[in-house]
Image: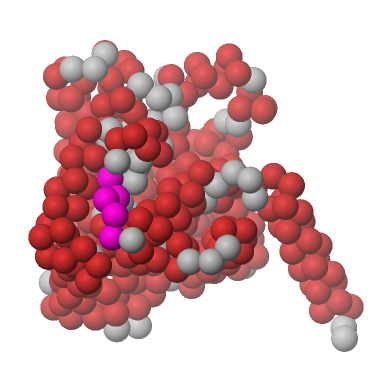
């Protein structure tokens, strides 16, 4: 074994031991969202109602199909299922980072550099996601894998992956208009088939009438739990930003709607310039993923881990951005990365979050992506 291989093996062993220790001493007893998924799986196994207001803050807010997909979590030991969920989350994070490098239109830096810098810049989001036992990493990985399938000409499987991402996180529905605009019949067929199967899947447990009732209950749950979450400083959505700024009401709703329309206009403008670049899909998918936490009324700060591909694109092409935009994007990414409670302290951190600085920084990041397309770089 060469010295380099020995060093790599030793480093890998240290990382694995560190991850195992982190799980055993800090995460194993937490993961509240994993508990939501396991509870939903247990209810689905017994064909019991999924959406219950008495679950409080941790109500199940996913599509009924999600509970059916999670059925394996409801079987067997909780300790084993919990450990497996953590391990899968870590492995999918590795997959997300590696695949994000793979789909770059061109790689201007080493794989290790791109993954390392991206990980550091988004580490606080990854850590919070895994501590909660959430599925945003999995959703992001499915979308980036879909981009890889598009690049390989496998449009049908790309559509299926997009449909699967919607099952995990319904706000991924934002990707469907993009698929329509691309006018690739195979990806549209895959997405349509996957979505139809997902919507019908719970009928295998609850029957058709029961499934229809569950879909209605899902919509009620999502809409009823939106308003109370707008006051939370960790909510980075447009709706929450303006609710904090001017108070909950029609004025805030109008401003939030205007911001969402502006973001969608940026996405459309970027799309209409796609013919000027050789590989348009990575940037377009990255842009939509980054917008999701702002557009969704229940967008929490850690959901910005969806900006993994965006971050990697901006690192890769940083030197090709114009001077002012390069500085603004760099500052925004650094501010995002190091605005940590333990570093800033309670008073400064809460003031930072009340001012919606994370959202503002990501608007700058979105501007950086749009600039790359405007300059025909990616």
Q: Residue at x 76, y 54 (%)?
A: 21
307 sits left or right of 66 in the view: right
341 sits left or right of 154 in the view: right
Q: Note whether residue 90 is visible.
A: no
Q: Residue at x 17, y 32 (%)?
A: 257
First to last magenta residue range: 47-51
Number of labels in the image equals 0
Dividing the image into 4 quarters, which one contains the C terminus? bottom left
Say which of 344 and 76 sits in front: 76
Dividing the image into 4 quarters, which one contains the N terminus? bottom right
In the image, residue 69 sits, relative to residue 228, either above or below, namely: below
In the rendered image, residue 302, in percent from the top left (x then y), is placed at 47, 42
241 sits left or right of 329 in the view: left
Q: Note whether residue 155 is visible.
A: yes
Magenta span dominant secondary structure:
loop
Residue 195 colored in magenta in the image: no
In the rendered image, residue 73, in percent from the top left (x then y), is placed at 47, 63
Residue 49 colored in magenta in the image: yes
22 sits left or right of 199 in the view: right
């Amino acid at each position: 074994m060469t010295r380099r291989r020995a060093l790599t093996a030793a480093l890998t062993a240290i990382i694995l031991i560190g991850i195992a220790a982190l799980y055993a001493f800090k995460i194993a007893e937490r993961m509240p969202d994993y508990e939501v998924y396991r509870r939903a799986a247990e209810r689905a196994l017994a064909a019991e109602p999924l959406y219950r207001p008495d679950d409080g803050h941790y109500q199940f807010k996913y599509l009924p199909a999600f509970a059916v997909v999670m059925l394996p979590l409801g079987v067997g030991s909780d300790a084993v299922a919990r450990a497996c969920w953590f391990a899968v989350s870590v492995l999918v994070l590795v997959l997300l980072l590696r695949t994000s490098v793979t789909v770059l239109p061109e790689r201007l830096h080493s794989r290790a550099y791109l993954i390392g810098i991206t990980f550091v810049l988004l580490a606080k989001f990854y850590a919070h996601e895994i501590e909660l036992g959430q599925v945003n990493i999995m959703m992001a990985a499915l979308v980036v894998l879909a981009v890889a399938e598009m690049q390989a000409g496998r449009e049908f499987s790309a559509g299926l992956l997009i449909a699967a991402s919607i099952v995990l996180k319904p706000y991924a529905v934002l990707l469907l208009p993009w698929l329509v605009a691309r006018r690739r019949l195979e990806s549209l067929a895959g997405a349509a088939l996957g979505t139809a199967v997902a919507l019908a899947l719970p009928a295998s447990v609850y029957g058709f009438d029961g499934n229809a009732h569950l879909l209605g209950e899902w919509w009620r749950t999502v809409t009823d739990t939106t308003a109370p979450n707008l006051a939370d400083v960790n909510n980075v959505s447009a709706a929450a930003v303006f609710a904090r700024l001017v108070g909950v009401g029609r004025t805030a709703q109008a401003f939030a709607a205007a911001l969402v329309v502006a973001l969608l206009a940026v996405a459309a403008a970027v799309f209409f310039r796609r013919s000027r670049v050789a590989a348009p899909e990575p940037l377009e998918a990255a842009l939509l993923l980054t917008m999701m936490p702002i557009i969704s009324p229940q967008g929490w700060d850690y959901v910005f881990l969806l900006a993994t591909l965006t971050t990697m694109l901006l690192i890769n092409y940083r030197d090709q951005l114009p001077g002012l935009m390069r500085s603004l994007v760099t500052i925004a990414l650094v501010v995002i990365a190091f605005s940590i409670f333990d570093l800033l302290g309670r008073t400064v951190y809460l003031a930072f979050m009340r001012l919606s600085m994370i959202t503002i920084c990501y608007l700058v990041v979105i501007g950086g992506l749009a600039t790359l397309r405007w300059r025909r770089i990616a």
